[in-house]
Amino acid sequence: MKILVTGSKGQLGSELQSLAVNASHQFDFTDIEELNITEESEIDEYSRKYPFDILINCAAYTAVDLVEKEIDKALLINSTAPGLLAERSRLINASIIHISTDFVFDGSASRPYVENDPVAPVNAYGQTKCEGELNVLKGNPKSIVIRTSWLYSQYGNNFVKTMIRLGQSRDEIGVIFDQVGSPTYAYDLAKVIMEMVDILENEKENSDKWGIYHFSNEGVASWYDFAYEIFMLKNIKLKLKPILTRDYPTPARRPHFSVMDKSKIKSVFGIQIPHWKESLGECIARMD
């Protein structure tokens, strides 16, 4: 089985690379230097030279606040490119696994979001990712879209690294407590994607597992709770203040409630998901 991974230098792509070392499949890891996914001609030429059976698209423009200013660039990467990748995958009879986000929802729910809940993004980033989902699903019937949330890893830039850096240089930090979601360790998501690949290989053309899935670690937290646990694990002593969203204005609105129901992915793929505190401890241990 030949697997093409795009966006390989990001958090999830890097975790997939760490797992691919012991995998039985043949992986081709690419980033913009090897393959510009916004150019249809490049995708076509690359797929002719290096055909694949499954494409895992980890590429995205994830700078949420910058997207408000650079909407055209974000649309290319988050919306147009996934559609091109899905269409090309279909033409060579390959499947695609595309990574999306909890930001497709508006955060007004009072219970965890399920896959068929109506989408209603409150910022430009969420809108571009929402359009990307639709383009993937329309472009290839053999597609899986995974919505995830609050991603972090030992690789790349993320909330965990930011909190550790700030905690080591400040005596006091204010962190938002009225936005609630579920942190996701990119390593855990990468492991699930690897399991999906194995299952799809065994089922070949007869798979009935295509569609949208939600994945995050178990449990619920505010950003304040998340930061508190990071400082506890790192034994960082400082004054941590809970603050309201209105006291920390940003160019892009954030959903106040981003908890997603993972029942579908657990049932269909037979996986177990660790609690976010357990996974955070593992990630920080890997960083040390």
Image (tube, rainbow, N blue to C red):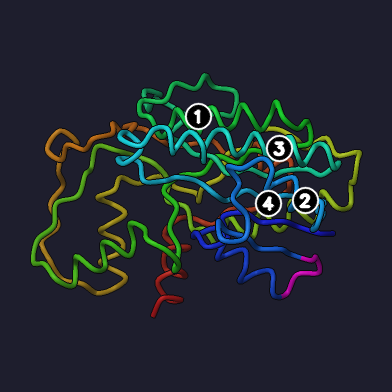
Image quadrant in which you'd find residue 19:
bottom right
Which residue position is annotated with label 3? 86
| In the foreground, 97 or 90 | 90
Nearer the observer: mark 4 or 2; the answer is: 2
Nearer the observer: mark 2 or 3; the answer is: 2
Q: Are marks 4 and 2 in contact (CB under 8 Å)?
A: no
Which residue position is annotated with label 4? 271
Query: 10 Å neighbourhood of mark 2: few (<14), some, or many (≥20)?
Result: some
Nearer the observer: mark 1 or 2; the answer is: 2
Residue at point 91%, 38% (across, down):
206
Q: Closer to the N terminus: mark 1 or mark 4?
A: 1
Query: 10 Å neighbourhood of mark 3: few (<14), some, or many (≥20)?
Result: many
Q: Closer to the N terminus: mark 3 or mark 1?
A: 3
Q: Closer to the N terminus: mark 1 or mark 2?
A: 2
Q: Is residue 263 visible?
A: no
Q: Are marks 1 and 2 in contact (CB under 8 Å)?
A: no
Which residue position is annotated with label 1? 113
Residue 132 horizontal side relative to residue 21, left or right: left
**Residue 23 colored in magenta in the image:** yes
Q: Closer to the N terminus: mark 4 or mark 3?
A: 3
Residue at point 54%, 35% (across, down):
261
| In the foreground, 254 or 233 | 254
Nearer the observer: mark 3 or 1; the answer is: 3
Residue 38 horizontal side relative to residue 138, left or right: left
**Residue 7 colored in magenta in the image:** no
**Mark 4 residue type:** Ile
Residue 103 percent coordinates (x, y): 43, 34
